[in-house]
Image (cartoon, coloured by chain):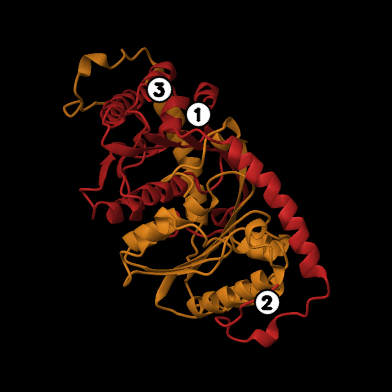
Chain colours: A orange, B red
Amino acid sequence: MTTDTSDIPDGSEIPADDGRNERHRARMVRKKAVIDDKIAQATRDCGVIVVTTGNGKGKSSSGFGMAVRAMGHGMKVGIVQFIKGAIPTGEEKFLRRFPDECQFFVMGEGYTWNTQDRTRDIAKAEAAWAQARALLRDPEIGLVLLDELNIALKLGYLDCAAVIADLEARAPMQHVVITGRGAPQALIDAAHTVTDMTPVKHAFAQGIRAQAGVEM
Amino acid sequence: MTTDTSDIPDGSEIPADDGRNERHRARMVRKKAVIDDKIAQATRDCGVIVVTTGNGKGKSSSGFGMAVRAMGHGMKVGIVQFIKGAIPTGEEKFLRRFPDECQFFVMGEGYTWNTQDRTRDIAKAEAAWAQARALLRDPEIGLVLLDELNIALKLGYLDCAAVIADLEARAPMQHVVITGRGAPQALIDAAHTVTDMTPVKHAFAQGIRAQAGVEM
């Protein structure tokens, strides 16, 4: 076994190999066999539905990270923001720089406790869904991000069965990312990948304001 | 109470208000008071340490979403990818388009079961940390993303106490996002915001390959 350290600043810092490296290698060979076997069983390509939910930080930012990933692969993306819209965000400012690559629709007016108008919130959610449906039907769009859609479903602003029917009728191979607290079980059942973002701790509870670049 | 529906395609679809809207408004007024009070108590601005960990999907993509958010606010970002590096990713392809805004360092060589060489993995992690330390000391960098650092700490490739000391000595007001499974407790203790990305389900287990734009 050779170890090329030519690109490492100071090779003398590498700990002496007391057999640990060899045991590590043998363990990794076994692990690789297990993982290669799992990879060999995953043979299907398809447009996936990804749902990020839960009360922890990271749901929307994960969606925006996937949008950027897709753009890196030359895919066009479409984004609809439900609920949010009262405060200009860094993601909106950044992604509006690429109108040929990213269609960005801010369709909300703010959190429910700020709008305080259920009838208007419902009308806004319906208009946002009409926009989302157009993106879902467009085969040119490789990834659609529906930010905070879960909240609109949880509050009953949109009919969950109708939303799922539109999701399932989307353009072939199109990926959809849906974010927000309280994803309904029917949507979880319809999705391929679901993550519950579980809060362990949050800066806000320590008296720290929402920070530009982190929370908005 | 007036409801401006002029920008909504078909106002006739709005359900009749049977008092639910008024009850909703009263509830939201109370909720707003509680939330406004909490917001009033969060008065401090500071550079935050955000950790995303757990076995679910969304850790790295959340970090890249925050990087894009920060860039939208005109902040410069620095990114170091530990462990990852064998496969070119969409986030790397995309973010390399903005060399003046984003410094992107891919310092890993792949997952441990592929490299199978602990000594070399450690040397690579140390070189990556030297790069990370330079970014942490640079007051021009508003947000530093240390992707998969948790794995390097979990495997003992880097000394956790030394890493935390460097994090705490970072440039004032700089945000740091640290991703990867198995974040050590000492890092969780040092962080402001921590999310455990808990898997509910994953496409891979359903025989679906990693998809460009979603997983890479």
Identified at 29% across, 52% down, the residue is B95
Q: Residues within 10 Å of mark 3 (few under 14, many from 20)?
A: some
Using the image, determine if residue B93 lies above or below residue A80.
above
Q: Quadrant of residue B48?
A: top left
Foreground pick, A98 / B81: A98
Mark 3–mark 2 Cα distance, whole angstroms, equals: 49 Å
Looking at the rendered structure, the secondary structure element under dot 1 is loop
Q: Is residue B165 visible?
A: yes
Q: Position of residue B61 (x, y in %)?
A: 44, 49
Subunit under mark 2: A
Q: Position of residue B98 (x, y in %)?
A: 23, 53
Q: Amino acid at mark 1?
A: Ala
Using the image, determine if residue B107 lies above or below residue A168.
above
Q: Quadrant of residue B214?
A: bottom left
Mark 1–mark 2 Cα distance, whole angstroms, equals: 41 Å
Residue position for label 1: B191
Q: Which mark is residue A162?
A: 2
Mark with earlier residue (3, 1): 3
Residue position for label 3: B168
Subunit under mark 1: B
Using the image, determine if residue A35 lies above or below residue A105.
above
Q: Position of residue B3 (x, y in %)?
A: 65, 76
Looking at the rendered structure, the secondary structure element under dot 2 is helix
